[in-house]
Image: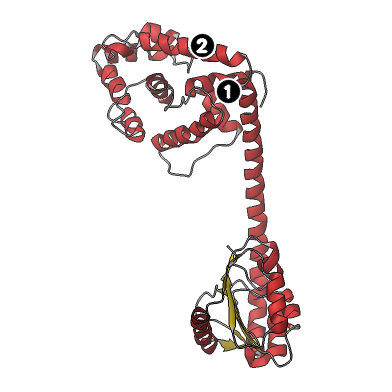
Amino acid sequence: MEKIKFAIKDEIENLLSRSIEVNIAVALCSKYAINALQNIPKNCNLRIVTGVDLPVPLDVLRALKNSYKKKAKIYTESFFHPKVYIFRMKNKSLVAYIGSGNFTEGGLLNNIEVFYKVENQDECNNILGWFENIFNKSLCITDDFLIEYKEYSRKWKEEENNRKSNIRRILNKTNEKKRLFDSLKEKLKEMRENKEYKEICKKRTDTVAKIREAIDYDNDFANIDIDKFLKITELGNIRQSYKKDLKRAVKSHKLRYLFRFLCNDDESIEERYRAATEEYKIRGCDKNMITKVLAVHDPQKYMLWNKVTEEIMHKYDIRFEHGTKVYQKYAHLCTEFKEIITELKIKDFVVLDLMMLYVKRRNLW
């Protein structure tokens, strides 16, 4: 790991003061670079190439032009994004650093960056050959360029400030959501470690058994009792106004076909959910009923998507990209919340549902 570096400011400054030749190619320089370069020996041959896309501050380009003339250049053929530092020592040996950090104090010290130190002379010479090619293709910094660049730099800085403001707003919101969600997990963890947890598990085991009996789960849904099923409000209340439609679906065996398909784990959950809302669609079989049947089928794998889930999603601003299909959302929810029940060692999704309901009712969130 000695060749892998995470902050090289001290090493760069030390090498600058001892080298007879310095070649630097970076996307960005700052005032720090100007100050650091003042430490090179007078007889040191310095060449530096910087990009202008990010952009480099105008006063830094002006200082490079005034101090180093034709030894300081800008690369303009394409977006310039390397971070390469090459040093030739008094004994003629080469040392190079390639990595992610620009020639700024942030890039060499304060930011999260990674560098690789190269001391193999063949590799160093290959890197130096690359630099020679870049340097020869680069342009000298002229007064005409600086005049044109001034307006570009001003506009870019305004846009960059707006971008930074927007990303700070997004990150602050994201961090706040994470803080709130971590708080929910902490409440669930407390409940998991409480004596009440065993009673919650027992209640949910009984509920699953009652629902399975109502839909005749163990008999391949041959005799679904809609009246009994609709009276079981746990795991999600299904509107009584759908009773006639559901009874017709029982009589025509459509509801049986739907339940059998939903419980066919040979199909992906996305495909099953999609089909339940399209070719197998039955009035009254919305996401509440679909996920209720799925959760009863396998509480370890399938999450409920009921009123409690909706309130959790609203409370913690759980959203999806525009255009995400409902079945894709459900698969994502199962994956995300599976991590929670695994981390907190909660028995399954039906137990999690009751725990979240208690958190809500007790205003713990």
Using the rendered view, name the quadrant where residue 261 is placed: top left
Tell which circle, 1 or 2, labels the residue nearer the N-terminal end.
Answer: 2
Disc 1 secondary structure class: helix
Residue under numbered circle 2: 202
Q: Which residue lies at the image location 59% right of the left edge and 84% below the top edge? A: 93
Q: Would you say residue 134 is visible in this rendering? A: yes
Residue 98: image x %, image y %?
56, 72
Q: Quadrant of the N terminus?
A: bottom right
Q: Which residue lies at the image location 66% right of the left edge and 38% below the top edge? A: 179
Q: Tell me if mark 1 has few (under 14), some (14-19) or many (20+) residues whose alpha carbon lies within 10 angstroms of its own.
A: many
Residue under numbered circle 1: 356
Using the rendered view, name the quadrant where residue 43 is placed: bottom right
Q: Which residue lies at the image location 70% right of the left edge and 81% below the top edge? A: 16
Q: Amino acid at mark 1?
A: Met
Q: Amino acid at mark 2?
A: Lys
Residue 348: image x %, image y %?
48, 23
Q: Which residue lies at the image location 67% right of the left edge and 85% below the top edge? A: 19
